Amino acid sequence: MPRFVIFDLFHTLVHGADDERDRVVAEMAAIVGVEPAALVRAYHATWRQRLVGWDAEQTVRILAERLGSSPSRARLARAAALRVDLARRLLSSAPPATLDLLDSLRAAGYRLGLVSNATAESAQAWADCPLATRFDAAVFSCELGVAKPDPRIYLAAVEALGAGPGDCVYVGDGADGELTAAAALGMTVFRTTEHNDTDPSWPGAVVATLADLPRLLPTRQCGW
Ligand SMILES: [Mg+2]
């Protein structure tokens, strides 16, 4: 009987580090010659474009130009490198208990997928992070060109796992309406509050820590 669990990434497997992201963007502003708060606002205002298109260097170029600066390519590269470094740090910050959970699920026969609304630097950092080898499939919005809650991003992971949506459990903090969309596809959904209480209105099951997940997963006896 196939058993599949699909996870969100930020605020689910690793902390989303929203404050740290803003701090890094402010540091980048100094490199490309724009006002830090204005660049932070510009990053926030363009999150959808960054999730499905622009890469790290393209983003800082476009936004710096919109704010009236024309930084050199060398400065753009230096600024973008800070975002890439941040992505590497974040993706390497999964708690040991989370890595143990993933290992125990795989040992129990589950196949694991990742569906992440992520910018290009996160997808780039994925291959070298400790999470990557624990997953059978990983789908990033920046690579697919669509983001959650669009059903196509879930179905890309489902297909890569060789599953059907109804065979899958989905676990996420609830950003971007991801839980409702996963449930609409027929997945069994758990909201996690381990890193952030993102979607308190979610009426379904909640886990305070991912370590609680195994005892809540459907068993073969109840229909898997
Ligand atoms: Mg999330």
Image: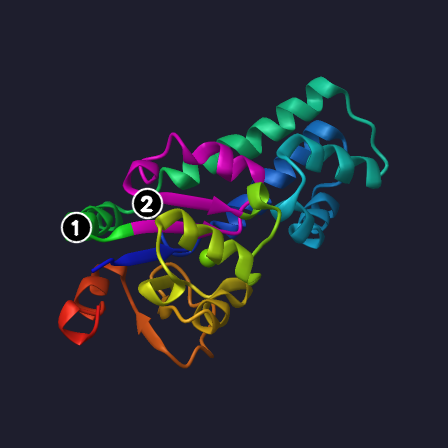
Q: Is residue 220 left or right of residue 124?
A: left
Question: In the rendering, at what x and y percent does residue 211 appear?
Answer: 21, 59
Q: Secondary structure at mark 1?
A: helix
Q: State whether residue 3 is above or below residue 57.
A: below
Q: Amino acid at mark 2?
A: Ala
Taking the spot 36% from the left edge, 37% from the top edge, the residue there is 92
Q: Amino acid at mark 1?
A: Ser
Q: Residue furthest top?
A: 74
Taking the spot 67% from the left edge, 30% from the top edge, the residue there is 57
The numbered mark, 2 or 1, whose residue comes first in the sequence reads 2
Read off the residue under disc 1. Answer: 104
Taking the spot 50% from the left edge, 38% from the top edge, the residue there is 123
Question: In the rendering, at what x and y percent does residue 43 appear?
Answer: 68, 47
Q: Quadrant of the N terminus?
A: bottom left
Q: How is the image coloured?
A: rainbow
Q: Is residue 157 left or right of residue 119?
A: left
Residue 7: in sight, yes or no? yes
- How many residues crowd around disc 1 within 10 Å: few (fewer than 14), some, or many (20 or more)? few
Read off the residue under disc 2. Answer: 94
Q: Is residue 80 left or right of residue 207?
A: right
- How many residues crowd around disc 2 within 10 Å: few (fewer than 14), some, or many (20 or more)? some
Range of the magenta residues?
Answer: 112-140
